[in-house]
């Protein structure tokens, strides 16, 4: 039997990058979050349908706050430093302490795409995962048709590890899951390769 681990504490939050702050979502973010997750363009490759009620935003915010408190999942809103606008979310979930791994997820309002925001946010979150959470591996799953997401992961140093066929059924449509992984040594290399 595995030794139980003490509750994981997410210290040193919020996180900050050149243009962004990554911080837990609050009740006041419900409308902005709903607008993001109810957009069929944003949700095209998501593994659950677009939201149809603002209640879903309130439930997600409450769920994330509890998960943060319990050390189960680090789910952060992404806001601009310039005008504190909530642009999206990024998360480390399915955190396994014994195996020192977690899964990465992310989404951004369509009006903010193509400006490098998500790459900037994920770099910070991944650094946090490998340093503060002492992870050994971060994994991600995406719809193989999701070209923007694939590009981000490859740029961050993730490697394609395999394909899980016909893994999802969302709104009656079946899709595959492409699995990507980033290991600690590779992350260290990408850090030294980054321009200062
Ligand atoms: C995936 C997503 C987060 C990308 O956010 P973003 O801030 O636009 O990402 P970035 O600007 O950092 O990088 C995106 C890169 O993909 C490229 N790209 C965008 N659409 C593309 C397409 N259809 N084909 C190929 N490349 C594409 C961009 O040009 C950019 O590369 P570049 O910087 O070399 O020009 C955003 O599109 C999104 O939220 N999508 C919906 C939710 C989602 O699919 N999440 C992932 C689930 S696994």
Image (cartoon, rainbow, N blue to C red):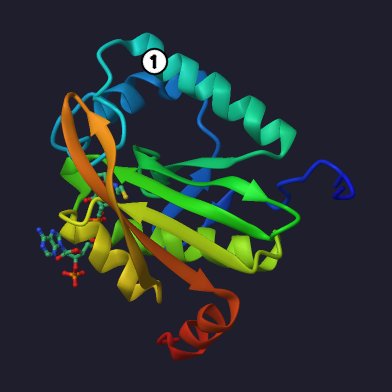
Q: Is residue 101 left or right of residue 4?
A: left
Q: Residue at x 56, y 29 (%)?
A: 64
Which residue matches tag 1? 56
Percent position (x, y) of residue 104?
Answer: 46, 53
* Residue 184 placement, left or right of 141: right
Residue 59 in percent (x, y) is at: 48, 16
Rendered residue at 54%/74% (across/down): 183
Q: Secondary structure at mark 1?
A: helix
> Residue 20: where, in percent of width, then height?
42, 53
Is residue 97 shown left or right of residue 156? right
Image height check: is 51 above or below 5? above
- Residue at horizontal 77%, vertical 45%? 9
Is residue 130 placed above or below 149 in the rendered structure? below
The quarter of the rendering in which ligand 1 is drawn is: bottom left
- In this picture, is 155 found above or below 114? below
Residue 16 lies left or right of residue 132; in this view the side is left
Residue 45 picture quarter? top left
Q: Nearer the viewer, residue 71 or 127?
A: 71
Query: In the rendered image, is residue 129 in sight?
Result: yes
């Amino acid at each position: 039997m595995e030794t139980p681990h003490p509750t994981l504490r997410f210290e040193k939050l919020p996180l900050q990058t050149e243009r962004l702050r990554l911080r837990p979502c609050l009740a006041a973010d419900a409308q902005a979050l709903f607008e993001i997750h109810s957009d069929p363009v944003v949700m095209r490759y998501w593994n659950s349908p677009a939201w149809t009620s603002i209640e879903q935003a309130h439930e997600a915010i409450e769920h994330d706050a509890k998960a943060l408190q319990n050390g189960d999942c680090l789910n952060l809103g992404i806001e601009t430093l310039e005008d504190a606008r909530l642009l999206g979310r990024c998360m480390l979930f399915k955190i396994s302490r014994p195996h020192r791994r977690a899964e990465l997820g992310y989404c951004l309002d369509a009006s903010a795409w193509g400006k490098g925001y998500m790459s900037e946010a994920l770099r910070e979150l991944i650094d946090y995962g490998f340093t503060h959470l002492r992870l050994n591996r971060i994994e991600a799953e995406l719809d193989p048709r999701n070209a923007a997401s694939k590009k981000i992961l490859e740029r961050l140093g993730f490697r394609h590890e395999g394909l899980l066929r016909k893994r999802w059924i969302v709104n009656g449509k079946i899709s595959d899951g492409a699995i990507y992984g980033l290991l600690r040594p590779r992350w260290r290399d990408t850090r030294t390769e980054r321009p200062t």
